[in-house]
Every structure is written in C-alpha cells, then in structure tokens.
Amino acid sequence: VAKERNRGVAVYDASEDAHDPGRLALLTELRRAIDQRELVLHYQPKISLPTGEVSGVEALVRWEHPRRGMVPPDRFIPLAEHTGLIGPLTRYVLDVALRQARRWLDEGHPLPIAVNLAARNLADPDLCDDVLRLLDEHGVPANLLCLELTESAITTEPEHALHLMTRLRAAGISLAVDDFGTGYTSLAQLKNLPITELKIDRTFVGTMTVERSNGLIVRAIVDLARNLGLTTVAEGVEDADTFTALASNGCAVAQGYHMSRPLPADAFDRWYAETRAV
Ligand code: C2E
Ligand code: CA
Ligand code: CA
Ligand code: CA
C-alpha cells in the first residue's frame, strides 16, 4: 500500500514556497500525516426531503494534528493540489471511506457514501482503476459510492473530466456536481455529463428564505435538475425555514448543520441510531 501511495507524488518545487516557511513546514508534515494515517473523516448525513430518512453521507477530511489541533480541509487540500500530494490523499480518503461503508453494510444498514475529488484528480490516469480496485478490496458495491466533483474543477479540466466521469459512471458509481451555481457550466455541458446529482452551493441555499433572488435561483436549479433527471441536493441548510422551503420547492435532498454537522464515525453512529429509533 505504501508503494501505491507514493505513486504520483510530485517532487517538491522549492521555488514555489521559498518565502513561506510555514507552508513548507505544513507540506512536510502533511506528507508524513498521510503515511501515519493522521487524517480522519467526518460524516455528514444527507436527508431525503420527502421522507426525512438518511439517504447517504458525505465524507469530509480533517487533519488531527498532534500540535496544531484540528486543521480544516481548506488549509491543506489546496496545498496538496499544488504539490501532487492530492493523489495519495484522495486514495487514502477513499480507502477510509470505503472501509466505513463496508462497516455500515455489515451492520445491516447500507449507506451510500460520497467522497470529494479535487480538480487535479481528474487528470490522474490511474484514478478510475484505483477506485474500482478499492471498491473490490472492501467488497462495497459501486452504487454505494458517489464521487463529488466541483463545478469549477469540471470546467477547468473539461476533457479529462468527461473521460474520467464516463468510466466511473459506466462502473455504476454515482457522480455529483458540487458547489453548483458558482461556476459557469452551460446547460449543454450539463446535459452531456454522465452525472446523477446536482449539489446547490450553500451561498444560495443559506440565504434563500431572506433574499428573494437566491430563493429564485434555488428554485430554478431544482426545476432544471428535475428536467434533466438529476437528484438535487441543497447544501448548507441551517434552519427549519430553509428545510421547509426546499421541500415545497421539490428539492430531493438536504444537507446542513440544521440536521447535523459532520461527525466522527462513532458520533455519527449514535446520531443515526437515534434518528432511526424515532
Ligand atoms: P464541500 O465539499 O462543499 O463540503 C461542504 C462543506 O460545508 C464542509 O466544510 C461542511 O462541513 C460545510 N457545511 C456543511 N453543512 C453546513 C452548513 O449548514 N453551514 C455551513 N456554513 N457549512 C456547512 P469542510 O468539511 O470544512 O470542507 C470544506 C471543503 O473542503 C469541502 O467543501 C471540499 O471542497 C473540501 N474537502 C473536504 N474533504 C475533502 C476530501 O476528502 N477531498 C477533497 N478533495 N476535498 C475535500
Ligand atoms: Ca462536497
Ligand atoms: Ca459543496
Ligand atoms: Ca465548497
């Protein structure tokens, strides 16, 4: 596995960071953290709006740093992307997420699990094979895995994105366009992508009940997605009003602090057991 993980690690370019010792230190530590399995996943439920049931989870990476404390992904994912560490990092996250998916399967309540891909992953020629191998190793059916690609990643790497997405989808993996509404994907592009899900960015969802224009944007995206046969997921649902408004707009799935923050696996399991007991 160590050999696998080292594949695709780019040589560090000192010139890029020459003036930022903090960044260099973080990079050195991140490389070690992946090997030491210091990165952990938190799980946030996706809730079906018509039924209120948990329809799946999104895995979100955090770095439990021995001295710096909990480092959020926004601090180290961009760094990993700039240095080629994103390849090993993504494979590590997939490995942990699929092990968890297998656990839920064994416990008798299979949960679809979503993992985020970075823009740089789209051009990785081995990624698809490695994803399929990991599914196989963990004995997780492909339809329990969803990969989330941001709208901006797809538009920066359109050819690579289409090629990779076509292969992943053919294998039965679900594909979501993340942060939808923040980029410039045309309707024509969207129609030609082999996707299953649109995730409406939380900048629209968060203020949809107080800013009329954002409410209209959310409704337009929900209608668009329905016409294209896609599942719509609203992210950043922070209150009951937003939850209700989304349900009446015909949005399929909601995700946000109102239902649950991303939780470590054991806390998620307790939360999930409680929701099922109700
Ligand atoms: P994202 O994929 O859009 O993930 C949703 C982010 O919104 C998460 O932040 C989540 O904790 C946060 N969130 C969820 N519900 C709410 C809410 O109701 N209100 C607000 N204000 N925020 C909410 P997080 O975990 O800090 O992740 C930030 C970003 O880092 C993610 O955005 C994703 O782009 C990236 N990321 C996280 N994990 C991974 C990973 O394993 N691989 C890659 N490539 N990127 C990751
Ligand atoms: Ca996401
Ligand atoms: Ca998002
Ligand atoms: Ca985001």
Image: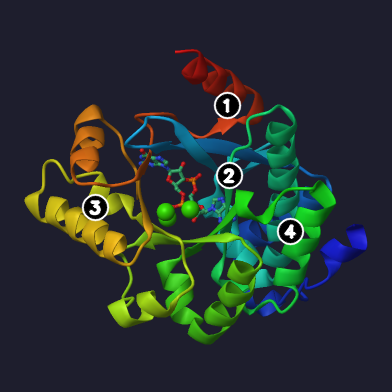
The disc, 2 or 1, on the residue closer to the chain's N-terminal end is: 2
Q: In this figure, which residue is indicated by the disc labeled 4?
A: 91
At 17% from the left edge and 46% from the top edge, which residue is drawn?
208
Which of the two discs, 3 and 4, labels the residue nearer the N terminus?
4
**Disc 2 within 8 angstroms of ligand 2 (CB):** no
Front disc: 2 or 1: 2
Disc 4 to disc 1, how far (Cα)?
22 Å
**Which label belongs to residue 112?**
2
Does the beta carbon at disc 3 come under 8 Å from ligand 3?
no
**Farthest left residue?**
212
The residue positioned 22% from the left and 37% from the top of the image is 242
Quadrant position of ligand 4: bottom left
Answer few, some or many: residues within 10 Å of disc 2's Cα (few below 14, many 20 plus, some between 14 and 19). many
How many residues crowd around disc 1 within 10 Å: few (fewer than 14), some, or many (20 or more)?
some
In the rendered image, which residue does mark 3 sit on? 204
Q: Nearer the viewer, residue 1 or 254?
A: 254
Secondary structure found at label 4: helix
| Circle 2: residue type | Pro
Check the image and name the residue furthest to the bottom.
Answer: 159
Residue under numbered circle 1: 268
Q: Residues within 10 Å of mark 4 (few under 14, many from 20)?
A: some
Q: Are marks 3 and 4 in contact (CB under 8 Å)?
A: no
- Counting from the top left corner in percent of width and height, residue 24 is at 68, 62
The Cα–Cα distance between marks 3 and 2, rounded to whole angstroms, is 25 Å
Quarter of the image for residue 254 reads: top left
Residue type marked 3? Phe
